[in-house]
Amino acid sequence: MKWKDLRHNGIAFPPAYESKQLSIRISGREVHLSTEAEELAYAWGKKRATPYVQDQVFQSNFLSDFGKLLPSEYRGVNYREIDWTPVHEYQIREEQQRTDPLFKKKVAAQRKELRLKLKEQYGYADIDGVRTEIANWMAEPPSLFMGRGSHPMRGRWKPRAGPEDVVLNLSEKAPIPPGKWKAIVHDHDFMWIGYWVDKLSNVRKYVWPSDISNLRQERDKQKFELAKKLTRSLPTVRKHIDVGLASDDLRIRKLATVCYLIDSLAMRVGDEKEEDEADTVGASTLRVEHIKFHSNNVEFDFLGKDSVRWQKTLDLLGPHNLVRKNLQEFCKDKKNADLVFDGINSSSVNRFLGTSMKGLTAKVFRTHHATETVQKYLDQYDG
């Protein structure tokens, strides 16, 4: 579904950090902070009552960014040498002030007024003549990266994005919003309003129309229609996979085996992940160390999405023994850290699936499995 006309005012940005003239102590000496360093110190102080500040990975990652902003003689500082008391004392005074009912009411009213004003300017787009709400019309503020699970980058600083980082999607004849934007494009095939590349994760961050917009509703409808189509086409798709399992072409055998795991175990494809996830292990990114062969089955054991342990056993006897044979072949003479399906990624998996059913991807399989699970639950507890 393509749009014909797309107009909007760009996106809003969080206000710049205002210096509070804070300092810290390093080995007993007072160190005055630049505005940039102070912003990081202030964010760190906000975590003072959380377990994060005791997490050594979180500490180390934070210092890798914070240390670069300190005077040169302190660049190699150890976390234990830093006394955050001046920052904490300032924040405690702030928090005490916020407990005053009149102050809270005044600040809340000011924030609401500003939010409504900004939303009126940036919170709507005109899509094919229809005023449409934008979901995330303000760029993400700079912050400490939290991640999900035991993310190896937790504690790193996520820098702010500015207009010079943002690509806007507009109609060819639409007025360009004021600002020094990175680029203006006219991509009618996609419904995003704009995007920027996160400077920490190098992942694109998109601005989208609201989920209740006609365009998003239509796209979601298409997604579930594809899942319904897969349900009807499963025999054909599975036959395509079975034929591939016995192919003389090594690459086809690998692709078919990956797809078998995605279908049989509802396994993620592997190299498609969100920005706040750790590197996700899945079918295409399995390593030799993740597979154990037993007499009657094959065991899979690895850290999956959100660094949560994923452990399942697949019985591979009879007609399914071909999958076992392929897995053993792909693991042969490899080290534990080697990829089982080297040379295979999500794009090649999706192309393979697409030859059996137009539009079929690993994500469609995920939608199919999810809706099937929900339906079984509803059938079980209905009435």
Image (cartoon, rainbow, N blue to C red):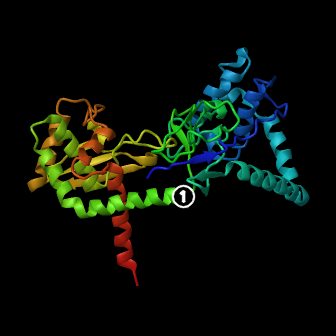
- Residue 212: image quadrant is bottom right
Q: Residue at x 25, y 29 (%)?
A: 335
- Residue 263: image quadrant is bottom left
| Residue 205, position as x, y percentages in the image | 55, 41
User: Which residue sits furthest front?
Assistant: 173
User: Which residue sits furthest right?
Assistant: 102
Q: Residue at x 62, y 35 (%)?
A: 158
Quick check: 236 left or right of 227?
A: left
| Residue 305, position as x, y percentages in the image | 42, 47
Q: Which residue is mark 1?
A: 211
Q: Is residue 271 above or below residue 25?
A: below
Q: Is residue 281 above or below residue 164?
A: below
Classify mark 1: helix, strand or loop: loop
Image quadrant in which the C terminus is located: bottom left
Quick check: 377 left or right of 180?
A: left
How busy is the neighbourhood of tag 1: few (under 14 within 10 Å), some, or many (20 plus)? some
| Residue 18, position as x, y percentages in the image | 81, 35
